[in-house]
Image (cartoon, rainbow, N blue to C red):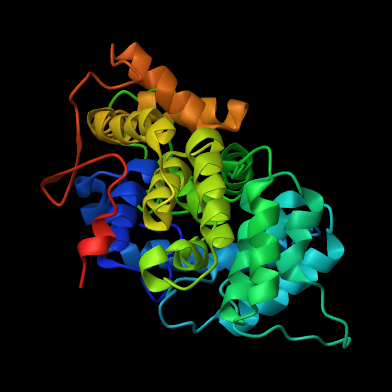
Amino acid sequence: MRYPRASSKPATSWLALLQGALLVIISGVTCAQQARAADASAADLQAYRQNLALSLQESSSPRDWALASQLLETRPASGAALHERGLILQRAANAAPDDRLVQTLWANAPLKDQHCRTGQCTDRWGALARLEPGNGAAWLAPIDHAWKRRDARDTEAALRRMAASDRYNEHLGESIDAWRDVFQRYPSPLPHVLPRYGADTSTDVGDELDLIFDEAVTTAIPPIASLFDACQKTKHPNAGAQRFDTCGKIARLMMGRSQTLLGRMFGVAILRASHMGGQADIPMVRAVTWQFEQYKPIEAALGSNAVAKQNHLDMIQSTDSEMQVIQYELRGAGIPLTPPAGWKQTVNGSYVEPLDDPLAQTP
């Protein structure tokens, strides 16, 4: 199955562990479903995705072109299709400058270079931020671009803009809507490749729903490796205090306003890495980590119940907020949204205090 893009250079072993756990939670994929993706039908599924990419490129819709570029990423680690993806995305971005989903894909694609046939490149890193300047998620691409260029001035400016944002929405619901539309318009001709959910979904494991959600998460969730690196105090002991104060504000924004569980947990990680947490932050950190741990059994149930999974996607699509849905499902299961006194998060089997930085002890 496909998951959100990960950095080719993990910031830390603990962060990689956190991301791995979160990607399973957010995608709602069980171990059994992952095993099915590795069987003989995997080759047929890859062929279907490649053919779908070609069909979408022939569409008149720039959004279809942009989504097609993601389907070409069958081997993300090799980078084999990056050049072709870059050309497709540039065409889509130029044709649809106001389409937020297109600009999201364009901004976050892991392209090494930008190829300009006309000699005038679109500023892909800033395009999404111009569309949604008040959305913190839109500033991750400018931070990533500046950080990788080692441009301290632009990095600090982008961090400040992100910290000043009044919301943080990855628009996962919009992404689900787009991918649902794609798979409904172009169903698999081979039922064993992608069993469709129908009128009777009581025994259907919902493979199509899994694929829709996997692709939607990959589209919507931006990479945060550069943000985390910039905010990791143990790596930058001589950086100015203002940098980490800004990182603390970003962390609080993500913990309190991100519309995905992944975004909120990364907010916790950034707060801890910046060493800017205070007593006032403890209730929020405990609530986020509690909700993450308590959601695991609900996620497991979703993996084997296509009806519940379809309702889950429907609600995220209608609200454009995974967190609203997760909190609704937690309450429905009789689980409070805040932990009892004395509860502590565990990382690698050890208890972690709310403001502790597990990386500070990492060699």
To which quarter of the image does residue 196 belong? Answer: top left
**Which residue is at the front of the view, 265 or 100?**
265
Image x and y of residue 295, in percent: 29, 30
**Which residue is at the front of the view, 34 or 195?**
34
Number of numbered discs:
0
- Image-based side of 235 in relation to 218, left or right: left
- Image-based side of 62 in relation to 166, left or right: right
Which residue is depicted at the point 80% across and 85% down? 116
To which quarter of the image does residue 46 belong? Answer: bottom left
Image x and y of residue 43, in percent: 35, 68
Image x and y of residue 274, in percent: 43, 56
Of the 4 image quadrants, the one containing the C terminus is bottom left
To which quarter of the image does residue 261 belong? Answer: top left
Of the 4 image quadrants, the one containing the N terminus is bottom left
Image x and y of residue 181, in percent: 63, 43
Where 49 sits versus 276, above or below? below
- Image-based side of 358 in relation to 284, left or right: left
Which residue is depicted at the point 40% across and 61% down? 45
Where 241 sits versus 25, above or below? below
Where 320 sits versus 215, above or below? above
Which residue is depicted at the point 50% across and 25% down? 324
